[in-house]
Image: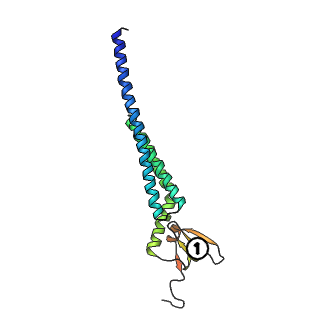
Amino acid sequence: MNAQDVTRWQDMALQYGSELGVKVLAAIAFWVIGRWLIHQVGRIVQGTLERQKVDATLMRYLGTVINVTLNILLVIGILGYFGIQTTTFAALFAAAGVAIGMAWSGLLANFAGGVFLIILRPMKVGDFVSVAGITGTVKEVGLFTTAINTPDNVLTLVGNNKIFSDTIQNFSSMPTGVSN
């Protein structure tokens, strides 16, 4: 090896090293700025949920889901910046989303049932009803479940999807002695 070859190798190493150094510094900057933005989004979401008086447990759960999702997207973005193929990661992320959606399908059905119960109002708090095989007084109609206090003083939570997809008998909706 002559001096010219050594110089050429040194120049190449310096060029690739400086390009890699710039990419590493940019990735660190992306990470720091991305984490700061994720923190700001978390604060905004939490503030919004607090103003709407959402349950603290639900707020923490939603905050964690948002935080994890945004961090995964940040890491995938940084890997893509380095030229690493991220299509596999995107496919895994999409598959995880489908799996979570299927796991939550019952919860989403209860949510949809709750929305319809709140909009259509086949019963209200204080009504004596028989729904989904449970008879008692409605204590709360929530987004996911309805709380019914049975005559033997047992608080029973029934999924709204089950209520909405079954027969609803509201004994309080008509005055006593009136028939049609």
Query: Hey, what amino acid is under mark 1?
Result: Ile
Q: Is residue 86 visible to the viewer in this orientation of the structure?
A: no
Q: Residue furthest bottom?
A: 177
Residue 67 picture location, percent across and down: 47, 49
Taking depth in this image into account, of 161 and 140 the one nearest to the observer is 140
Q: Counting other residues with Cα less than 10 Å from the Cα at mark 1, is it few (<14), some (14-19), or many (20 or more)?
A: many
Label 1 belongs to which residue?
Answer: 148
Residue 151 image offset from top left, x and y in percent: 64, 78
The chosen color scheme is rainbow
Q: Nearer the viewer, residue 12 or 123?
A: 12
Q: Is residue 178 above or below residue 108?
A: below
Q: Residue at x 42, y 43 (%)?
A: 74
- Tell me if 18 is positioned left or right of 104 in this view: left
Give the structural element (helix, strand or loop) at label 1. Answer: strand
Q: Is residue 21 above or below residue 134?
A: above
Is residue 143 something one can see in this rendering? yes
Q: Is residue 80 left or right of residue 103?
A: left
Q: Position of residue 111 (x, y in %)?
A: 48, 64
| Residue for point 43% across, 51% down | 40
